[in-house]
Image: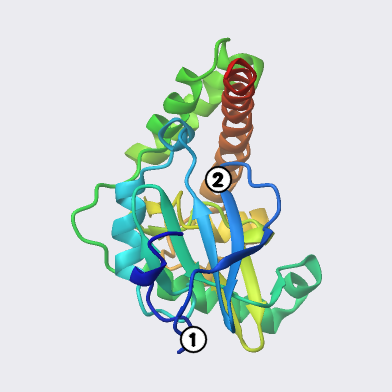
Amino acid sequence: MLKWRRWKKANDLTCNSLPMVEKELGIGLVNRSFLVRSGKFRAVVRVNSIDSDKLGIDRLRESQILEALEGKEFVPNILYRDEDVLVTEYISGVKLDNESLKSSEFRSHLSSVLCRIQTTYVTDMNRFSYLECCNSYARNLPYNPSEVVDWQRLCLVAKEIDRSFWAPVLCHHDLIADNIIIRQDSIVFIDWEFAALGHPAFDYVKLFGENTPRGMLSGSDISPSVIKQIKFLQSAIDDLWFAAQNILKGSSDERGQND
């Protein structure tokens, strides 16, 4: 936080003195995040994991996406970032819950935000490969990935999705409840580190499951069978990620004991 003088304003408030840590924001699975305060100024400081790349996080790609999203009302304002930390405005509100998802009005609002995300243009970025994503997690496992997932089926599904024709769009790729904050009449998505140019149905299926109304999707040719494939893909990738994360966490704990 010694670089606090470089931070931008947050909600028209300037950080006028060295901020103090108010609390750690939960137990992060990848990074550590802290709520900091300086007078009325509040911000979130995320300390990046040293194992980011092994967990499928491309910090350069994240930086490009955050630049493309700058100024959008559905993302926090970026106050400062470098290779080690990301400082964003603090967003107060409530996290997404199942009751909200049952509301047709809220689902429509959420769908409209996803549409705006998907129409955000990001330059100089390749289409995301779901097969390579699976392989990268598998390479970090000291055992056969078949012990975690149906590896043969996963590779076939990922390869089929990669090879099929679809126009890549900006995908968050991690739309869990903790990453969606509802404040008054707006919805804010946080934690964009897994975002990439991916399949147009991915974020919708993550939120709405196999019952995703086809009318929500920008591509009318996305069939129920493709939605089912993406649902399986998401579940399997999550299982692989957690397996890789547990291995890295064990290695990190061991390093800490040896220090």
3D distance between C-alphas at marks 2 and 1 = 25 Å
SS class of the residue under badge 2?
loop
Q: Position of residue 163 (x, y in %)?
A: 33, 38
Q: Is residue 225 left or right of residue 130?
A: right
Q: What percent of the width, then of the height, locates residue 45?
A: 52, 60
In the image, residue 119 sits, relative to residue 1, either above or below, namely: below
Residue 7 visible in the snapshot: yes
Is residue 104 depicted above or below 207 in this figure? below
Q: Residues within 10 Å of mark 2 (few under 14, many from 20)?
A: some
* Above or below: residue 35 compared with residue 8: above
| Dot 2 amino acid type | Asn
Please name the amino acid that badge 1 sits on.
Asn
On residue 31, the disc is 2
**177 sits left or right of 15 in the view:** right
Closest to the observer, 188 or 154: 188
In the orientation shown, which residue stands out farthest toward the right? 99
Which numbered disc covers residue 11?
1
Residue found at x 60% / y 21%: 247
**146 or 65: nearer the eye?**
65
> In the image as oriented, which residue stretches furthest toward the front?
17
User: Is 97 on the left-hand or right-hand side of 46?
Assistant: right
Q: Look at the numbered disc 1 and give the secondary structure of its residue.
A: loop
**Whether residue 165 is visible:** no
Which of the two discs, 2 and 1, labels the residue nearer the N terminus?
1
Q: How is the image coloured?
A: rainbow
